[in-house]
Every structure is written in structure tokens, then in C-alpha cells.
Image (cartoon, grey):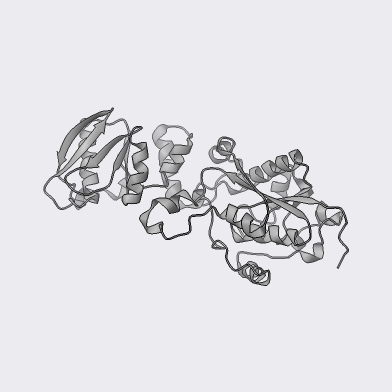
Amino acid sequence: MSEPNQIQARAVALISGGLDSMLAARVISDQGIHVEGLNFFTGFCVEGHTHAIRNRDRKRAKRNNALWVAEQLGIKLHIIDVIEEYKEVVINPKHGYGANMNPCLDCKSFMVRKAREWMTAHDFDFIITGEVVGQRPMSQRRSTFPVVQRESGAGDLLLRPLCAKRQPPTLPERQGWVDREALFDFNGRSRRPQIALAATLGIEEYAQPAGGCCFLTDSAYSRKLRDLWQSRGDKHYELDDIMLLKVGRHIRPRPHFKLIIARDSGETHYLQGYRRRFNHLTMTSHSGPLTLLEGEVTAADIELAARIAARFGQGRDAERVVFDAVVDGLTSGLSVQPLAPENVQPEWYL
């Protein structure tokens, strides 16, 4: 085994909250290198608020996995808001989208570029990621690794400890800051090597190793995002837009408006925070969910929306269901017959 350089190098690790980034940071930290973590908040993360909103998720751990990983590793974590900068990545990805709306290669280049900027500003020496060659079809391939290094400006200051032995030695390895012999040669989509390494290192708890942390990889979420852009006629979004796409049933019975119907009481409580921004329907004759209306609506649209919403409350089989309809700040009563199942069009559901 080569003798490590006595220089106390400092590394910044991209921490997603998953197993791979946890292992990568741990492997380098175990070599005596000072490691701090970076986590970039884009607004598209699966964690946290979504687990806290829905009733069915109430028993799940309410934690930010990146913060939890940093705590387990005993390293400092810097969470950086990149929502505005990240919009260009989502809206105009140079390398296109993956299977859904995931701009994975552009995203990785963006994250590493931001890490390089942070590294330079804070006098750190190199960057760590938990990438494994061959693991992801768009961003983690042998041919795309050099693209990320080039487009991020990180060059050979980017070290991927879990598959380093399948790559040319990086500057940290050549300088002796990092012992290359203590790095790994993981390859492919199987997570067994990572799970085995975790066991060797005494890591017993971690986020699901095969799970993604980004809603843009989800087909249902991606459909709703495409619909949002199509309905507006251009590609733009604000944080509230992408948060609302994560909550409720989204139903578009007409091109110019859609319904967002809470799926349980937890989502109803959450959507109540948006009542002042949207026209909305509240069921008063029966127990039922809150419904937000997005778009310009006529009286006929409101009646259709109420008939659809009535299907999701306890009055779905009643002759009439009564709502309070709040439109343009004015409240009025509305009594409707729930829409018959045969009249509900499958294509309305996003």
C-alpha cells in the first residue's frame, strides 16, 4: 500500500442522502482527509414534506436524509438553495431528458460545477461523488464521466471513490492525498457491492439503495409537469408550482382548467394553505376533500368541477352534494349531482 502524502487535504462531498454518497464520503474520511458535505436544494426532492403530508406516510421517518447521513458520518453539511439557477437545467437541458423529465447529465454537471465553485471559494482541494460507472443509463456511463468533468470545470479534481480503479488516476490520487489502493472498482447497476461495503464499515441503516431522490425521474410527476407547461404555453415554474404537483389528484377535464383534489385529510390540510391563491370547492353536505381549481373558469366549468369532486367524498352515491364554491373571492352555495362513473374520462387524470 502506498504511503499517503502528509499534506492535510480537504475534500467536499456531494451528499444526496443515499447510500452511495454516504459510502464515498466515509471511504475518503477514513483516509484521514477532512470532508464536508454539500446538498443542493432544487425543489424536486422526494423527501421531507411529502412524507409529512399524507396520512399513509405518517409512520415513515420524517428526516432529511442528507442531514442524517452527515450526522452519521460526523461531517458538516452545507445545504445550498439553487432553485432559481436550476431552472435552466430543467427547462433547457443541453443533453436532453432521460426516460421522464430528468435532465440527469446536465444536472450532474451543474451540481459538480457548483461544488467546484464552493470548493474554490472555501479553499478545499477536491470533490467527491458517489457515482458508479454503469449504474445509471444517462449520467453514470464511462462515456459521460469525462463530459461531467469537462462541463463542470472540475477536471481531475473530481474523484469517484467507489469506481476510481476503473478510471484514470485523479490529481488527489497522483499527489498522494488519497491512497488509490484503498478505493474501489464497482461497476454496473447491482447495489450488492455497496451493501457489502456498508456492512464491512459497520453501516447498518441507510436510505433505500435503489431509490432515487428526484421527482423528475417519476413518470406520474413528469406527466403533470409537461401538462403544466402545455397549459401555460411556455416552460416556466415557481417553487409553489412544483410543490403542488407532488400533492393530490390532478384532473384536467378541459384544456383551460384543472382540479387538484386532496387524497386524504393530510393533503386537505396542506392544500388549505393555498385557498387564498386559488378558486376552490369545499364539500359541506358530506365529508370530502378540498378541491383547488387552477385556470380561468366559467359557471359551467365550476359545476363540472364540483360534479367530479363529488365522486371523491362520502356523497359519491348521493342524489345531490352541496359545496361552498369560492370564485374570485366570493363564496356561493352549489348543489350538484355527482358525475356518473361512465362519464369520467380516463384521459382527464394526469
Query: Where 109 sits versus 195, above or below?
Result: above
Q: Residue at x 59, y 49 (%)?
A: 104
**Quick one: quadrant of the N terminus?**
bottom right
The x, y position of residue 157, in whole percent, is 78, 49
Counting the numbered discs, the total is 0
In this view of the protein, which residue sits in the foreground, 95 or 323? 323
In this view of the protein, which residue sits in the foreground, 309 or 102? 309
Farthest left residue in view: 319
Q: Residue at x 71, y 41 (%)?
A: 118
In this view of the protein, which residue sits in the foreground, 305 or 78? 78
Report whether 302 appears left or right of 125.
left
Q: Residue at x 81, y 51 (%)?
A: 9
In this view of the protein, which residue sits in the foreground, 178 or 53? 53
Residue 269 seen from this side: yes
The x, y position of residue 115, in whole percent, is 69, 44
Q: Quadrant of residue 257?
A: top left
Report whether 214 appears left or right of 168.
left
The x, y position of residue 191, in whole percent, is 60, 67
Query: Where 182 sits versus 240, above or below?
Result: below
Report whether 333 appears left or right of 297.
left
Residue 255 seen from this side: no
The x, y position of residue 337, in whole percent, is 14, 44
Q: Quadrant of residue 269?
A: top left
